[in-house]
Amino acid sequence: MLCLSSGCFFASTSFLPSSFSMYAVTLSSALFLLEKYAGAVSVAAAGVILGWPFSILVFLPVTVYSLIRGSFRRVFLSGFVTSLCFLVLSFVADYYCYGRLTFSVFNLLKYNVIGGGESHLYGTEGFSFYFRNGFNNFNFAFILALLFLGVVPFARKKYAPDLLIVVSPVYIWLAFMSLQAHKEERFLYPIYSLICVAAAAVIDSLPDFFHDKYSSDQSIFEKIAKGLRPLILGFILCASHSRTFSMLNGYGAPLQIYQHLEHHDDTGPGSILCVGSEWHRYPSSFFIPSYISEVRWIDDGFRGLLPFPFNETLGGTTAAPSYFNNKNKAAEGQYLKDIGACNLLVELDLRRPYPSRGSDLSTWEALAALPFLDRELSPALYRSFFIPYRWQQNNVFGLYKLLRRLHPDHA
């Protein structure tokens, strides 16, 4: 499940603080089960300070029980020294990058917790968001993971208390994050490996429901339960592959489109690449070839704050430009007003009644166009999971386009 579940497939390769926390949670939990308590606490400290400070809730059960079970002095000193080293390292890095005394770990907590919580400015979701998201990424394994507490009484000798301690953050984290107004899929990453552990434990314990402790012989139901285990696991892995296939083929067009840029350097040096409503799928400047001088946003109605081109003359990373704000309000100048300056354009054409910019064939030529799944018009089941012979037929697709402005003599 760790290798093939859709959730771990995407989370493990993401360059995100929550992904780093997931690695740390996995290693810390493994060290705890191996009774290496000092190592478990040290890894937990690294996950919180170098990864994501909020993930302290996920590490809490393992950390507390490590202090209780191991040599308190040794475990405490291990965690304290590790924390101190990483805090100093973080402080030095912050001073070097920002040119002043500041502490990014504390600033993150201050903005989101102490400062009244401004994260709701970036969108809100309902209470059920993470439960729906968990099912999409782990299908029935997620349901089995939630049932772990109900299985513990039947398999107490195997799972209590060690595995119960390791899995308990699944419930703590789900409850805490579901109460927050602002929700994102990546916020669930720290417990992804624990979901797999809990689900695997439930599958493994199925025969225990039918075991007669007063008899040495296996009942027919216990034998059937043992035979069902590989079938259940196989079904979960097939559904996971179905989800992964749907995500890659339905929503993979943006990454592929930006890779096409390297084949069109005949556009000329100093070209400007423009992106409108698809700003949130812009991957990274590392995808942009050297012949493109800058990437600019064009106004398609979004009124939040967007990144500006990096300006070394303002002081580099030490600068705090006046056009940034902590209220997620669009800044003056973040949009390119003269669209005529755009040499290249990336846009998503969902074939709505209103025309897209790329539909003007007298101005733009299509360099590449790839299918992109239309979430609004596609049924939830078919867009979430690949079902052979049905996925292509039942879903609706738009076109993700890379366009180039025609020269006047070609228009």
Image (spheres, grey):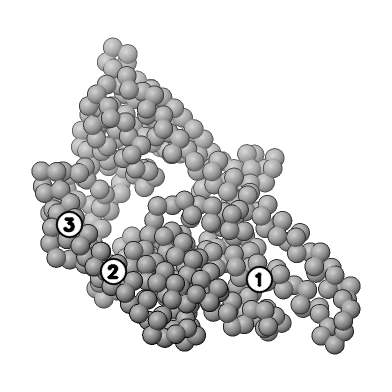
Q: Quick one: label 2, few (<14), some, or many (20+) residues within 10 Å? A: few
Going from the N terminus, do you reach mark 1 or mark 2 first? 2
SS label for mark 3: helix
**Above/below status of 241 relative to 359:** below
Residue that appears at 76% across and 59% down: 231
Can residue 309 be seen here? The reply is yes
Going from the N terminus, do you reach mark 3 or mark 1 first? 3
Residue that appears at 44% across and 65% down: 24
Q: Are marks 2 and 3 in contact (CB under 8 Å)?
A: no
**Above/below status of 379 relative to 123:** above
Going from the N terminus, do you reach mark 2 or mark 3 first? 2
1 vs 2, front mark: 2
Q: CA distance from mark 2 to mark 3?
A: 17 Å
Q: Are marks 3 and 1 in contact (CB under 8 Å)?
A: no
| Quarter in which the C terminus is drawn | top left
Circle number at residue 85: 2
Towards the viewer: 130 or 315: 315
Residue 88 occupies quadrant: bottom left
Residue occupied by mark 1:
201
Q: At which x and y percent is residue 40? A: 46, 73
The total of numbered circles placed on residues is 3
Q: Which amino acid, by three-letter code, is at mark 1?
A: Ala
Residue occupied by mark 3:
96
Towards the viewer: 187 or 296: 187
2 vs 3, front mark: 2
| Quarter in which the N terminus is drawn | bottom right
SS label for mark 2: helix
